[in-house]
Image (spheres, helix red, strand yellow):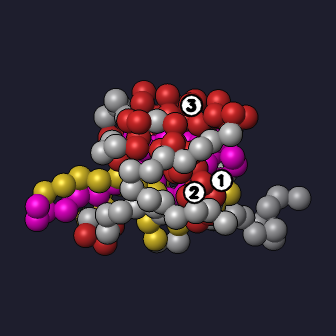
Amino acid sequence: MSRPMVPGVRGHVPWRRRPAVLVATAAARLIVTLKPHRIRRVLSVVRRGAAPATTSQVLAAREAVVALSARCAGENCLQRSVATTLLCRMRGVWPDWCTGVRTAPFRAHAWVEVDGLPVGEPHRSAEYHRMMVVPALPRKKLSEEPS
């Protein structure tokens, strides 16, 4: 069971897990420089073959990203959400990656969610109109898989 996310408090990541987190945050930093449709395309390709993530898996990935990256721990929600998603993918799972906007006052936001619920987010995603989503793909049923 993960401890609750406390704003402003960064957790500890074991040394053996740090390389994957650093790779995910570095890759995310590059990906977020792309145009939005290219970000969606890259993430859509990367998610192939991943199982849907659980809330605890996504929360653990988000906490690790925030613990090791000051940029992701701050207001950089786009890089944080992409890094969290990439770290989940490195672990074989995929959350729903979302971006959206609200109008009053105007604000754009990016986040990850599982089963329609945001994970580790202080913002209420219900206030945001979704603009882009790269959802987890459902697992194929055994009867649908080729023999």
133 lies above or below 39: below
Q: Quadrant of the C terminus?
A: bottom right
> What residue does disc 3 label?
22
Considering the numbered disc 2 on the image, is that residue within a helix, a strand or a loop? helix
Asked whether the viewer can see residue 49, the reply is no
Residue stretch in magenta: 78-105
Considering the numbered disc 3 on the image, is that residue within a helix, a strand or a loop? helix
Considering the numbered disc 1 on the image, is that residue within a helix, a strand or a loop? strand
Q: Amino acid at mark 2?
A: Val
Residue 122's disc is: none
**Are the residues tagged 3 and 2 within 8 Å (C-beta)?**
no
| Residue 57 horizontal/vertical position (percent) | 63, 58
- The nearer-to-camera label among 1 and 2 is 2
Residue 93's disc is: 1
Residue 81 located within the stretch drawn in magenta: yes
Q: Amino acid at mark 3?
A: Leu
Q: Quadrant of the N terminus?
A: bottom right
> What residue does disc 2 label?
58
- Side of 59 relative to 77 (left or right): right
Question: Which residue corresponds to the image point at 69% horizontal and 33% vertical from the top-left?
Answer: 15
Q: Foreground residue, 110 or 143?
A: 110
37 lies above or below 130: above
Neighbor class of circle 3 (other Cα within 10 Å; few <14, some 14-19, many 20+) is: some
5 lies above or below 91: below
Q: Amino acid at mark 1?
A: Val
Residue 69 located within the stretch drawn in magenta: no
Q: Residue furthest front?
A: 9
Q: Foreground residue, 45 or 88?
A: 88
| Residue 94 horizontal/vertical position (percent) | 59, 54
The first of marks 1 and 2 along the sequence is 2
Asked whether the viewer can see residue 10, the reply is yes
